[in-house]
Image: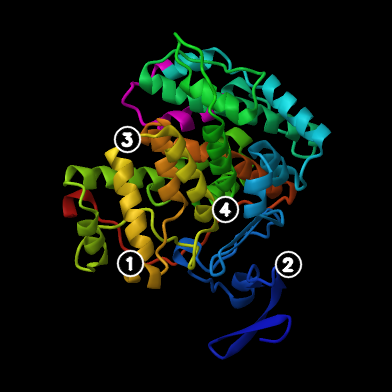
Amino acid sequence: MSDNIATLEINGEKHEFPIIEGTENEIAIDIKKLRGSTGGVITIDPGYKNTGSCQSGITFLDGEKGVLRYRGYAIEDLAEKADFLEVAYLLIFGELPTKEQLEKFHKDIKKESVVDDDVKKILDAFPKSAHPMGVLASLTNALTAFNPSSVNVDSEEDMYKAIVKILGKFPVLVAWTMRKKQGLPLDYGDSSLGYVENVLKMMFKQPNEAYTLNPIVVNALDKLLILHADHEQNCSTSTVRIVGSSHAGLFASLAAGISALWGPLHGGANQAVLEMLEGIRQDGGDTKKYMAKAKDKSDPFRLMGFGHRVYKNFDPRATIIKKAADEVLGDLGVEDPILDIAKGLESEALEDKYFVDRKLYPNVDFYSGIIYRAMGIPTEMFTVMFALGRLPGWIAQWREMRLRKEPIGRPRQVYIGENHREFKNISNR
């Protein structure tokens, strides 16, 4: 490989491909002309672990060093100094907003926060047993029916209107999804509140009493949403981009992302953590027993919420949210055996040589599950809260993809099926 060229030799014939270098010194071999120049040769990379699908200026992460930045800003600084709406603006438009820009952004979002009343009829059609993620994906897709005009991506005004519309309506859908599950009346919120404060009120206000905001809970949720706002080309984000590459609308692309996030290996991981903790509680709550099971390679038990597929050292988001988790538990004073088990596992894992040597630290899913449990959010709503946080990242990625006029996504395959076979009439089979 020279400074700017990679050489690939196939059957004695050499082919050269340009080298692309990112602003953080990431190196990529540009193989978009591979198939054409080699007469049909392709690469195969299940899970796309070594394949870059795009060039993006939104999020940078270094899993080996535990680095996460949005638009160049360290996640630690954003979580400490910014609020979720500022981070949303940063991700989508590329720069932190001025005071005037942020006020206008919030004002425009609030104007779009009323959902068409007919959406309630769609919600009413779901049984209470429906999983909230399925309901949320359906309602998000349904918004397309109430906003049928396609977004002119060449118009900044049209793009902006679509963005504030979904940012205004999505929290309402999130709150309605939970309240439907609990049999509570639906609430449109309070336009005098901040974005995160309004989410909490819409979710938790009881019909027969005033709702009082807890600043520690507000701060914890604000941080959680910031930490989940984007994470490079993960499963759901890649889904949003590839669906959007067909020129599907923003709402439809987001609904596809919600469905991708639903899986237990992705956004459903924090729900899986609580389900694991509940299983340990039902078995007597012996954390040492389950730590031993986790270390036994012959045991099928898997310790959820520890380690991370991308972060090989530590998850920087977990370091930030651990403090918020401690503050929430301390302030609310919740007595819950599930949370006691969680704290026991955390304490033992941080001191156990097996986990320390392998850098299997508690990750953001572990702590987010603890916080949501303490706040009174039902377990099946955890992934819905993840979607609320990831919304601005999905929007930013969709917008970037459309503005860059990326081609429609169309992966190749290596066929391993039967060769040509003669058709047999049914009487001869």
Q: Quarter of the image containing the C terminus?
A: bottom left
How far is the residue under mark 3 from the one under mark 1?
A: 26 Å
User: Tag 2: Cα neighbours inside 10 Å, few (<14), some, or many (≥20)?
Assistant: few
- Density class for disc 1 (Cα within 10 Å; few <14, some 14-19, many ≥20) is few
Inter-mark Cα distance, 2 to 1: 38 Å
What range of the chain is rendered magenta?
A: 124-144
Secondary element at tag 1: loop
Residue at numbered disc 4: 231
Q: Is residue 150 visible?
A: no
Percent x, y for residue 105? 75, 31
Tag 1: amino acid: Asp
- The tag earlier along the polypeptide, 4 or 3, is 4
Within-10-Å neighbours for mark 3: few <14, some 14–19, many 20+: few
Tally of numbered tags: 4
Confirm or deny contact between disc 4 and disc 3 (CB under 8 A). no
Tell me the residue at 57%/53% (across/down): 231
Crowding around mark 4 (Cα neighbors within 10 Å: few <14, some 14 to 19, many 20+) is: many
Q: Nearer the viewer, mark 4 or mark 3?
A: 3
Q: Nearer the viewer, mark 4 or mark 1?
A: 1
Tell me, yes or no, whether the two marked residues, 2 and 4, touch with CB atoms within 8 Å. no
For discs 3 and 2, the disc positioned in front in the rendered view: 3
The answer to whether the residue labelled 3 contacts the one labelled 1, judged by CB atoms less than 8 Å apart, is no
Look at mark 1 in the image and give the residue it sits on.
352
Assess whether residue 133 is covered by the magenta stretch: yes
What kind of residue is marked 3? Glu
Residue drawn at 58 percent across, 53 percent down: 409
Q: Residue furthest bottom?
A: 12
240 drawn magenta: no
Instruction: Tell me the SS state at disc 4.
Output: loop
**Distance in Å between CA atoms under marks 3 and 2:** 48 Å
| Residue for badge 3 | 335
- The image position of residue 411, as x and y in percent, is 53, 59
